[in-house]
Image: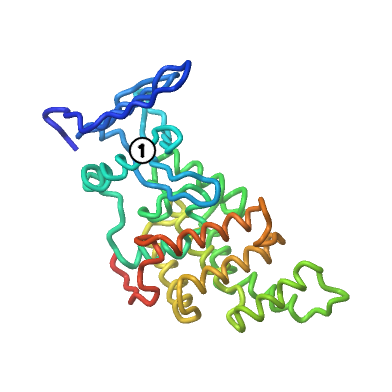
Amino acid sequence: MVSVISKEIFKLERKRFFKKPIIFIAYNDGFYFQNPRSSEKVNFENIINIFIAEPYRLCEKRFVILFKSADGEEWRLDLTKSLLGRGVEKLEKLFEQEWRPLLSNKETSETIKWFNAAYAIFAVATWRDLGVFGGLVPTEGAKEDEFSILAADWGIESREEADEVMELLFSGKTNVQYIEELKKSKEVADPFRYELCHVIKEKMGDKGVLAWDLVRLIHVASMCYIAGIYTKEEALDLCLQAAEILQRVYSSFDEMGQSYLLGYSFWSKEDLNGKTNDARERKDIHEMLLKLENGPYSLDFHLPLKKDW
């Protein structure tokens, strides 16, 4: 956005005992943020992305601003209620009414929004923006970070290795492992997985934990796009294939999410009802997403998917 005159929209000041106050000023062309350590006016052309991270379990709702500082470094500003009080609610209103129209990176395709909804549990757990394919704006910093994660977690450092992972996930690798584990007797099976496999069979029937493989395919394909391994169109084409299978197998985002969570539990050997583990965190995220009035799960699960990119 190019503004002739910079105009203040509103100002928030949070007084803190024995410390300098925290000040946030929103302008029509950017924002100013001062905390006890630094202060800077950031113009809108240096804002990479803005989004709202919904709360779950012990996490607060966050108003997130990603921006480039004067020296070109990429920064993330997480504004929470404990930091700015009721001011966070004002920021939400500002975002919807004043700033969102200025962000050209938000997805408008209903099909791409469906993809984002499919991997929403992963996106929320890793603090990503559900309004952007892959959850991140593909800056150089994001590209380097995603490449490092793909290399460390998936062994992906090239297009050939990415293609191999896509093939494995399309084949339902974890679902096949679950079916094999289900055949084992109690005497030879892993105790945790033995009990879990029978829970999966009772809850999901023949659908198993296929969602764990195919939902991961969608988010890994999107990460490969951010990392520069696939083009956006190539990643979206892969997502479309996986999404069409998910729509045929499952009846709702809830059922697909349950299958995904059971698959996570099978893969990680973590109890979904544990107190502090990652499996319980993801279960809590899924339950939070189900309650959101205008959240990603509010989309029609059986939305006719089409290649509109």
Residue 256 versus residue 10: which sits nearer the camera? 10
Q: Residues within 10 Å of mark 1 (few under 14, many from 20)?
A: few
On screen, residue 164 versus residue 139, left or right, reads: right
Q: Residue at x 36, y 31 (%)?
A: 68
| Residue 98 image offset from top left, x and y in percent | 21, 43
Image color mode: rainbow
Reply above or below: 224 against 164: above
Q: Residue at x 29, y 63 (%)?
A: 109
Reply above or below: 114 against 142: below
Q: Amino acid at mark 1?
A: Arg
Residue 177 versus residue 236: which sits nearer the camera? 177
| Residue 117 image offset from top left, x and y in percent | 42, 63
Reply above or below: 232 against 46: below
On screen, residue 280 versus residue 59, left or right, reads: right
Question: What residue is disc 1 on?
Answer: 86
| Residue 141 figure quarter | top left
| Residue 91 image offset from top left, x and y in percent | 31, 40
Residue lying at the far right in this picture: please name it. 187
Q: Residue at x 51, y 72 (%)?
A: 256
On screen, residue 273 versus residue 56, left or right, reads: right
